[in-house]
């Protein structure tokens, strides 16, 4: 399989293990534009690649992913372009999660740095998670004046239960690696310099196991996640797109760029 067409991410395959790296370190691997398109479609190629038995997903640079690109959001707030983006987003988001969940090869998220918003949900939708002890994780959509609609309302309650999920999502709370492990949001926490070593150790172990037993066990468990996705996503993403039309969202985006506290007026 030729992965050279991908330039916003890299795919390296060695001994049956693919390492997919979000590769926009200057933007803290914000998932928008070409990176959003490629992180949606790369799973289709990986699913067809018979040379791959396990996948490791990580980020280049200091962050795993900062989530959406706030600068782009601020520039488009209240514009026709922003409205068009809102109309496309539900379809794109649904395809991203469907493509990822349908990959038969197990996916290990190696969370090398902060994972925020969509970046956090991308990591949590993977099959197991290894997090650097210096990293943090949050779905802080509400702090930007928008609904936690692009996956957070789906995966967080499944992992930690509805009440604890609401405590994080309604407040936009940030969890340290230790806290994320303690509440079972992530599976493993290791020193940052040991992160890829630990992720690859798990990948090698899985790669030596019977391929169909592993793959079909994964797909069986993912039926529950897909069911919750079908139940929740259309509603949550629709609400998210509606909140992108509010003045609170525009104010939050501007305040973020201007490094000040937002002043919400509930409009």
Image (cartoon, grey):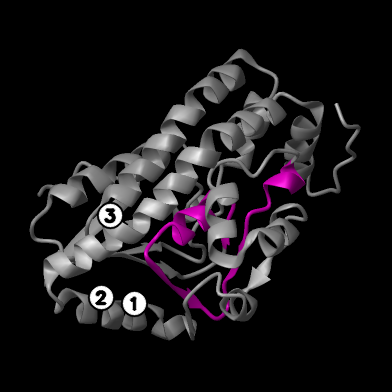
Q: Does 120 lie within the magenta span?
A: yes
Q: Residues within 10 Å of mark 3 (few under 14, many from 20)?
A: some
Residue at left 25%, top 75%?
203
Q: Is residue 116 left or right of residue 213?
A: right
From mark 3 to mark 2, how far is it between C-alphas?
A: 18 Å
Residue located beneath label 2 in the image = 203
Question: Which picture quadrant has residue 177?
Answer: bottom right
Query: Residue furthest toward the top?
Result: 80
Q: Is residue 199 visible?
A: yes
The local secondary structure at tag 3 comes to strand
Is residue 8 positioned above or below 19 on the image? above
Q: Nearer the viewer, residue 120 or 197?
A: 120
The local secondary structure at tag 1 comes to helix
Residue located beneath label 1 in the image = 199
Q: Which quarter of the figure is the C terminus placed in?
A: top right
**Residue 178 in the image: x percent, y percent?**
61, 81
From mark 3 to mark 1, how far is it between C-alphas?
A: 17 Å
Q: Are marks 1 and 2 in contact (CB under 8 Å)?
A: yes
Sequence order check: which comes first, mark 3 or mark 2? Answer: 3
Q: Nearer the viewer, residue 67 or 210?
A: 210
């Amino acid at each position: 399989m030729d992965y050279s067409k991908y330039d916003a991410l890299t795919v390296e395959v060695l001994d049956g293990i693919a390492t997919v790296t979000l590769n926009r370190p200057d933007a803290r691997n914000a998932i928008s534009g070409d990176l959003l398109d490629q992180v949606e479609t790369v799973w289709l190629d990986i699913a067809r690649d018979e040379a791959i038995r396990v996948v490791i997903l990580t980020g280049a640079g200091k962050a795993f992913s900062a989530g959406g690109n706030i600068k782009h959001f601020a520039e488009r707030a209240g514009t026709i372009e922003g409205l068009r983006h809102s109309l496309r987003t539900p379809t794109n988001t649904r395809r991203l999660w469907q493509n990822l969940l349908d990959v038969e090869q197990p996916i290990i998220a190696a969370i090398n740095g902060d994972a925020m918003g969509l970046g956090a949900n991308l990591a949590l939708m993977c099959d197991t998670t290894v997090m650097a002890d210096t990293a943090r994780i949050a779905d802080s959509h509400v702090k930007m004046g928008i609904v936690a609609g692009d996956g957070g309302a789906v995966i967080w309650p499944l992992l930690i239960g509805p009440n604890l999920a609401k405590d994080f999502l309604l407040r936009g709370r940030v969890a340290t690696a230790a806290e994320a492990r303690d509440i079972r949001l992530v599976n493993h926490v290791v020193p940052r310099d040991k992160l890829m070593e630990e992720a690859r150790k798990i990948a090698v172990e899985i790669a030596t196991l019977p391929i169909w037993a592993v793959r079909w066990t994964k797909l069986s468990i993912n039926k529950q996640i897909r069911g919750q996705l079908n139940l929740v996503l259309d509603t949550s993403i629709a609400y998210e797109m509606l909140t992108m039309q509010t003045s609170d969202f525009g104010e939050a985006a501007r305040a973020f760029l201007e490094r000040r506290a937002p002043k919400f007026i509930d409009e």
